[in-house]
Every structure is written in structure tokens, then in C-alpha cells.
Amino acid sequence: MLTRSYSLPTRIGYGIAGVVLFVLLWKAVGVFGWVNPGILPDPFLLPETFLLEWQSDRLLPAIGSSLIHYVWGLGLGAVCGILVGLAAATIQRFDMLQSYVSRILRPIPPLAWVVFAIAWFKVSHAGAAFVIAIGVFWVNYFATYSAVRNIDPRFYELARSFGQGGYWRRSISITLPAIAPGLLSGVRTGIGQAWMTLIAAELLGVPGMGQEMNAAAGVGAYDAVVVYMLTISAVYAATDLLYTLVERRVLSWRP
Amino acid sequence: MASVIEFDRLAYTHPGAAAPVIENLSLDIEAGSFIAVVGGSGVGKSTLLRTAAGLLMPGSGEMRFNLPQRAGRRRRAIVFQDSRLLPWRTVEANIAYGLETLGIDKAQSAARVAEALRLTGLEELHDRWPHQLSGGQAQRVGIARALAVEPDILLMDEPFSAVDALTRRKLQTELIRIWETTHTAVMFVTHDIDEAVYLADRVVVLGNRPATVVENLQIDLPRPRDRNSTEFAQYVTHLSSWLGVE
């Protein structure tokens, strides 16, 4: 728990110091020979590896390919999850119909669907996006469903009192804005979850960072593996930043 | 004078309950008049108001609106105890909420909102978010939202019971000023007899189980009313005797 409030420069300073310490410790492990140098890359050589991957035209196409899987998987999964979640939470008969189906399908890990992804889509962008979408779907489905269930019923009473009690009127004037915070936090969880599934989904052979990592590991180029790991981290940070900007805009009404 | 709303032998039973909350309740509210409804807690004051608001369906009896329905207006509008502002709308967007389904154009709607802001003294707060308002300000926005639909009757459900005593006094004075400007009939539910005598033309006491009107008292005091006058105290004492409080 934070007990004192430090200034922003101090906090940034500590953050950078932490990174430097981490890299030095990593370097020390190699220098003092605590592990076999073949399986732990030298952190100081990483910039060079990065440049090499970049110049050999492997890094950028891999990022591009991964982003295709990512954007489609995340987008489709989120949109479908939100729509089905909304329908289930607001239409009682549909809720009853889907209740057991969702309980049966939800526990299946997204990666278990890789088998069908290959069967249905072959080794393709669509297959990777499909696997990602499944994980994202459930996250958004449940976030939306519980956000709708948690709406204060007094808002619906207000809607009825002021002539906005019909299904569509009520959905647009109360339900959607009221669930926005819950819905967006579902989207954010999905953003993280999609990256995790992405790499695993690409290990099945679809071009992308996952495949490049697998290829590099196959020839013992662990420094390249680390470069891809760090790239994933950077792209994720960028996505999350984008998300934060959108959230701040959409939820500007919150204290 | 014509009555704006007429309850005729009204009865209401909560779903699943054996005994009715309200039975055989008849009451006329004249156009432009200010009626306060008092009664012990749980007697059915809110039930009556919510029936009037159309939020509950009466089990038997009738509720009649005697004024003609007019385009661009609502017959009734409610002010809740908890202000109930939509946190994702600014003050003016909250006030416009009831106007969005009235089929009036943008300019007209903006004019109505501006007028409601002016009446309630909220002009400067028009672009604030609800979380930036004090309890008293939020309650004013609730009143402005109800006034914007230009109802025949304003239904107020203990609207000042959640604010501090000083703010409550100010809001009471304000409400009388607004009412004297708009001539909208008001049905004001409260458990505070002092508040009822200060505000209303007539005070209706609900009593018995199931509830009926046990007293319907005209308050013949000029406004602004002096809470410290002997006459004021006599009204309060008389009404208190109905509620079994000394």
C-alpha cells in the first residue's frame, strides 16, 4: 500500500532505476556464468538483434500479420460478446435459452478450438483470429451481462416516468450509458487476453510474432525470441494506451 | 375550479400481499393548487403518489385526468426523493430527458431547458456533471427536469427529506416561488407536518389500514408563511393529533 505520495519525477525515476537494475541483474547472471550462456541472451546485444530482425524484413511483417489476427479477433469477439451479453441480459426468454449453452461452452479454453480452427479455416489469418475471438467473446459477454444486471432499477423507473420506458428508448437512454464502465473494463480485459491467445494461436503455423518466436527458438536464437517478447510488450502497451484515451473520453462524466 | 386529477374510490394491493395498502381513497386536486399528503411511515403516501405517476396500476377505482391532453406536454411529472439524475448526462441534458419523446423540435426543447434552468436558478451550473453538485443542487435539477415537460401536476415524493435542514428551508421557499410563477398543481408527499403547513393550500392526512383520507385541511395562511406564528402552530398541532404525535 502506498502510504506517502511521491512527486511524478520521483516515481518515474524509481521506475527507470528498476528497469536498469533488472537489466544489470540479467547481465550479471551471464557475466558470472550462473547459467549456460547459450540459453540466456545477453541483454546488451538485444538492440543489435532488434536491428537485424528489422533489417531482414522479418519483424515488421510479423507485427503486421499479428495485428491482423489481433484486430479481427478482438473486434469480432468483443462485438459479438457485447451483443449476445446485452440480448441475454435484457430479453428474458433468450436468457433462459442460452443459459445452459453458455455454461457448457464457456469453460472450454480458446486454445482447445485450434483443432477446429485448422479444420475450418486451414492455417490462415481467419483461423488465428477465430481462436482469439473465442476468448475475447466470453470476457465481453460476461462483463456486459453482469453490467446490465447491476443497473440500478430506479433508473428504469425514471425512464418510465419520463416517457422513455419502451425497450429501445430505455436501452439507448439508460442501459447503454449505464453499462459503459463495465463494458469498457470487459473490453480492456479482452485486449490483454487477446495477446495471450494470439501468440499461442500463431504457434500452429500462421505467420506472425508467435511463429517467428517459434522459428527463432528452433535454431537456438534466444536473443531473437526476447526481441519478439519485448515487441509484444510494446505493442500491448500502445494498445492499452489507446484504450485509456478512449475510456477517458467516453467516461468523462465519472468523478 | 376544475380538478386536474381525481382519485375515485382508489384501491391498491401490492403484488402477493393479502391486504390492500390503499382502499376506497377519494381525492380531488384542483388545477394550480398545492396539496401536501402526510401520514405515518408505511401508511401508503408513496403508493398513492406512485399510482398518480402511473408507476403503479390501481387495483380498483379510478384515476381521472380532467384537463385536456396538450401536445408537447405531459400530464404529470415526478420529482424523486433521491433526485435520480443520470450521472452520464450534464445538468441540461438531464433536464431535457423528459422532452426527448414529446415530439418537439430542438429549438423549442432548448428554450424549455433554458426556462427550467432559469426558474430553478441553475443557469450557471448548466454544463456540470451530477457528481459535481451538492444535494440541494441535484434536487433542484430534479425539479427543473419535471418542470421542463410543463406538466399539469407535479408529483413530489419527499423531495427534500435527504438534504440538510438549512437547505431544506431554502428549497421550500424556492418551490413556493416557482409554484407561484408556473401555477402547476403540486402533490407533495412528506412526513414533515411543519413542511406541509408551510407549503400547501390543503393538507391531506392519510390514515388507517388500508389507507384512506382521514383529514383534508385547508390552510388559510397568507404567503410567505411565518413558521413562528400562533396560527401556524395551531395547524401543526391539529395535524399532529391525527398522526398520534405530540
Image: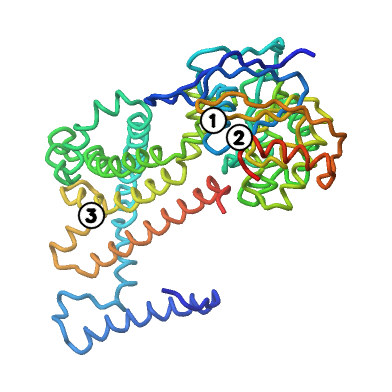
**Chain under disc 2:** B
Q: Nearer the viewer, mark 1 or mark 2?
A: 2
Dots 1 and 3 on the same chain: no
Between residues A57 and A21, which one lies in front from this camera angle?
A21
Residue occupying the point 73% across, 40% down: B236
What is the number of the mark on residue B44? 1
Circles 1 and 2, Cβ within 8 Å, touching? The answer is yes
Identified by mark 2, the residue type is Gly
Quadrant in which the N terminus of chain B appears: top right
- Find the distance from the CA under tag 1 to the CA under tag 2: 8 Å
What is the number of the mark on residue B127? none
List x then y, in percent, for residue B155: 65, 29
What is the number of the mark on residue A210? 3
- Find the distance from the CA under tag 2 to the CA under tag 3: 72 Å
Q: Considering only vertical position in the picture, is B175 above or below A70?
A: above
Dots 2 and 3 on the same chain: no
- Dot 3 surroundings within 10 Å: few (below 14), some, or many (20 or more)? many
List x then y, in percent, for residue A219: 13, 64
- Dot 1 surroundings within 10 Å: few (below 14), some, or many (20 or more)? many
Residue occupying the point 29% across, 60% down: A56
Residue that badge 2 annotates: B39
Residue B26: image quadrant is top right
